[in-house]
Amino acid sequence: MRMLAIETSSLVASVAVVEDDLLLADFVLQHPMTHSQKLMPMLENALTYLGLTIPDFDAIAVTIGPGSFTGLRIGVSAAKGLAQPFGIGVIPVSSLRATAYNAYDSRRIVAVMMDARRNEYYAGAWKFEAEGLATVVEEAAWPVDDFAARLLEAALQAGTEVLLMGEGAAKAYERVHAILGDRVTLAPQEMRCQRAASVAMCARLEGIQAVDYDKVPMNYLRRPEAEVTREQRLKG
């Protein structure tokens, strides 16, 4: 199975091409340019280097959230636009859960955090078990202290440590460390950022089913801030 993977949930834009269990291409760019500027050139370069076209793919995996509302819309819209003309299925993947696969087979609890603003983080935690990736703390928009408290409880119960990942991990680390102490380790930057190769791995290893381009769900976890602000203004 040949799969194209797209990740645009954070500042990082990433594109990967996987054939069965072989990673053919993995492009990662962390730059303040918008995803609309970064994504398609990266995709075109990957296909050019590999001598492939979109009809050569069996599926397109894309992160559906949580994360940047604008970034997610660009990534999902690109996946839909590429899939529709050729009847290719789209595999919807959680951006948080996919990032946990950066630490595949770790013995520690893998916690992933993304800055959601308003003093919250999109976050969740998992542990790799023999039967697959088990949820330890469910995905939600968490106040950092509440999430850290849940991590501490899970770490004590499992008798293990926590590896902190995701684009919001560095910002949250001081508060998380204050609660967990030496039970938590901040993953190195190269390991904690979102990447499309892990999106493809998550889709493949978990056997996530593809859906038609017009049935791709979104997983924002909370309403866009612009909608909330508009509603507050109307009430005011």
Image (tube, helix red, strand yellow):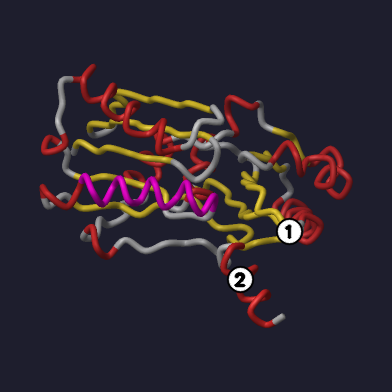
Residue type marked 1? Arg
Residue 38 x %, y %: 41, 30
Dot 2: element: helix
Q: Which picture quadrant has residue 52?
A: top left
Q: Which residue is labeled 2 in the image?
A: 230
Q: Nearer the viewer, residue 58 or 104?
A: 58
Q: Nearer the viewer, residue 233 or 165?
A: 233
Q: Which residue is labeled 1 in the image?
A: 118
On residue 91, the disc is none
Tell me if residue 157 can be seen: no
User: In the orientation shown, which residue stands out farthest toward the bottom?
Assistant: 235
Q: Nearer the viewer, residue 36 or 144?
A: 36
Residue sitting at x 56%, y 58%? 135
- Tell me the magenta residue range: 67-82
Tell me: 22 left or right of 153.
left
Residue sitting at x 12%, y 49%? 85
Residue sitting at x 67%, y 48%? 115
Q: Which numbered disc, 2 or 1, marks the residue that appears first in the sequence?
A: 1
Label 2 Cα crowd, 10 Å radius (few <14 / some 14-19 / many 20+):
few
Residue 15 x %, y %: 36, 32
Work out how far the residue at label 2 is from the one at label 1, CA to CA, in angstroms. Answer: 16 Å
Does 193 lie within the magenta span? Answer: no
Tell me: 176 left or right of 199.
right
- Relative to 131, say whether 37 is above or below: above
Residue type marked 2? Arg
- Relative to 62, say whether 120 is above or below: below
- Relative to 164, say whether 152 is above or below: below
Residue sitting at x 27%, y 37%? 4
Residue 235 x %, y %: 67, 82
Q: Which picture quadrant has residue 11?
A: top right
Q: Main secondary structure of the magenta part?
A: helix
- Mark 2, mark 1: which one is toward the viewer? 2
